[in-house]
Image (cartoon, rainbow, N blue to C red):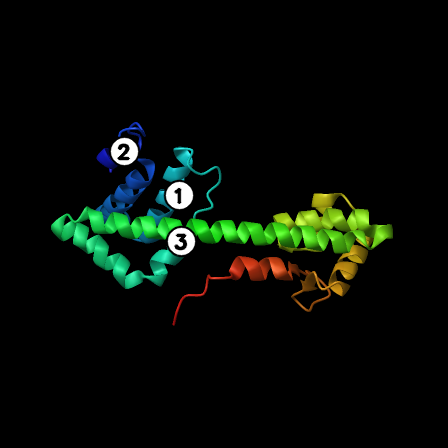
Amino acid sequence: MGKLELFWHDQPEKTPVLIKAALVHVQFETIHPFLDGNGRLGHLVITLLLCSEKVLKEPMLYLSLYFKTYRQRYYELLNEVRLTGNWEIWLDFFADAVIHTATQAVKTAQQLMRLSTKDGVRINELKRISGSTNLIHKAMLERPIASPNWIQERTQLSPATVNACLRELEQLGIVKEVTGQKRNRLYSYIEYIRIMSEGTELPR
């Protein structure tokens, strides 16, 4: 682990960052330093390395789903590196994972931006309470499943105003109360959640 850490902090110009991330991941999984959670942490290491090298501004590259989707191939290639030293085929697989995941992330971001604009236009048509409802809309873009209490704290609106605006958003079909309870309610930004969930289902 000490040598792996030294390689992690090696000067970025010596090893291209994406290749470094691919190498670090295999080495970490081979060392397998913990009794449990090595796979999850090994995936996280990739994203953290890309953030530390300023390739990513935020940890938004989620490769775990790709690795799970192609789980058998993923494990075969890890073993191939360990047994034969065939790094090239692993690097090809890793590059495909990054390209696929990054493309999907860009597509999702674009869809969310279009959704925000479209729903913002609909909210502006409410006129009298559009200002307060817009504040709630912006808050739920940050947290698409939220409680009225959190929304109140985030927007500094009164409980009555928050509840009135949430009713309007429900009538517009933008949000939906998901608990069916009178207390401890949660509201879901329906289309936002649907977009975020696209492509996250593992094949049967």
Q: Position of residue 12 (x, y in %)?
A: 32, 30
Under circle 2, the secondary element is loop
x and y percentages locating residue 110 in the rendered image: 56, 50
Mark 3 and mark 2 lie on one chain; the one further toward the N terminus is 2
Q: Relative to residue 72, is residue 201 drawn left or right? A: right
Secondary structure beneath dot 3 equals helix
Tag shown at residue 14: none
Q: Amino acid at mark 1?
A: Thr
> Which residue lies under the disc numbered 2?
15
Q: Using the numbered discs, state the Cα–Cα distance from disc 1 to disc 3 in whole angstroms.
A: 15 Å
- The vertical placement of 100 against 16, above or below, is below
Q: Earlier in the sequence, mark 2 or mark 1?
A: 2
Instruction: Work out which quarter of the rendered image holds the C terminus and state it.
Output: bottom left
- Whether residue 87 can be seen here: yes
Q: Which mark is residue 100?
A: 3
**What's under tag 2, amino acid-wise?**
Thr
Residue at image point 70% right, 60% down: 174
- The x, y position of residue 95, in whole percent, is 32, 48
Q: CA distance from mark 2 to mark 1?
A: 17 Å
The residue depicted at 40 percent of the width and 43 percent of the height is: 47
| Residue 163 location (% of width, % of height) | 78, 57
What is the quadrant of the N terminus in the image? top left
